[in-house]
Image (spheres, grey):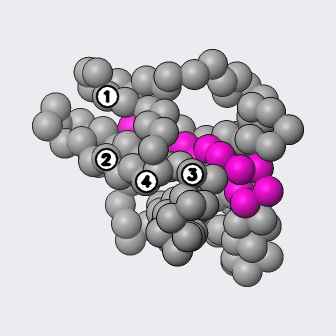
């Protein structure tokens, strides 16, 4: 069966910036990238703010798997945008990534921006906001 993980990442912030980045990934991406983008969930926070979320339990999360590489590329794309921005514009996007493995001490976390939207109080990923995961 192999080693399984629970994985989630969330991107939040300026809707225009997030949608432009997602469109770039879709237009430049292959079928694997497009499938990864189709797995994302979206929530409008306001007219100008958007949350983009990926969450999967019981997944084999190995960097050499093409679907995993595509999700890592999505998160990295926005992390690069954040780091390339002028200091005054950095508040426009924020990202959180958490992977929890089967071993209790196997937790990987990566954050950028000022808003931390996910945390690990125990071996379970928790979100600090209401989000209807049933909506496409």
Residue on which disc 1 sits: 120
Instruction: Measure the alpha-carbon separation of dots 3 and 2.
Output: 20 Å
Please report whichever mark, 2 or 1, sits nearer to the chain's N-terminal start.
Answer: 2
Residue on which disc 4 sits: 112
Residue on which disc 3 sits: 91
Circle 2 residues within 10 Å: few <14, some 14–19, many ≥20: some
Q: Is residue 9 magenta?
A: yes
Q: Position of residue 10 (x, y in %)?
A: 55, 43
Tell me the element at label 2.
Answer: strand
Q: Looking at the picture, tell me which residue is in the foreground, 68 or 52.
A: 52
Q: Is residue 38 left or right of residue 71?
A: right
Q: Is residue 99 above or below residue 135?
A: below
Q: Would residue 56 be visible to someone looking at this image?
A: no
Instruction: Measure the alpha-carbon separation of dots 1 and 3.
Output: 23 Å
Residue on which disc 2 sits: 109
Do labels 1 and 4 touch, CB within 8 Å?
Answer: no
Q: Nearer the viewer, mark 3 or mark 2?
A: 3
Q: Nearer the viewer, mark 1 or mark 3?
A: 3
The count of marks equals 4
Q: Is residue 92 magenta?
A: no
Q: Read off the magenta span.
A: 6-18
Q: Position of residue 27 (x, y in %)?
A: 79, 76
Please report whichever mark, 3 or 2, sits nearer to the chain's N-terminal start.
Answer: 3
Please report whichever mark, 1 or 3, sits nearer to the chain's N-terminal start.
Answer: 3
Q: Nearer the viewer, mark 4 or mark 3?
A: 3
């Amino acid at each position: 069966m192999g080693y399984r993980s629970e994985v989630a990442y969330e991107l939040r912030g300026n809707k225009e910036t997030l949608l432009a980045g997602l469109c770039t990934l879709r237009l430049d991406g292959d079928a694997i990238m497009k499938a990864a983008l189709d797995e994302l969930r979206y929530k409008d926070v306001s007219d100008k703010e958007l949350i983009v979320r990926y969450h999967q339990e019981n997944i084999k999360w190995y960097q050499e798997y093409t679907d995993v590489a595509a999700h890592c590329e999505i998160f990295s794309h926005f992390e690069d945008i954040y780091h390339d921005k002028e200091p005054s514009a950095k508040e426009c996007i924020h990202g959180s990534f958490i992977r929890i493995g089967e071993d209790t001490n196997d937790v990987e976390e990566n954050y950028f921006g000022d808003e931390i939207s996910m945390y690990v109080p125990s071996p379970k990923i928790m979100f600090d906001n209401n989000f209807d995961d049933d909506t496409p």
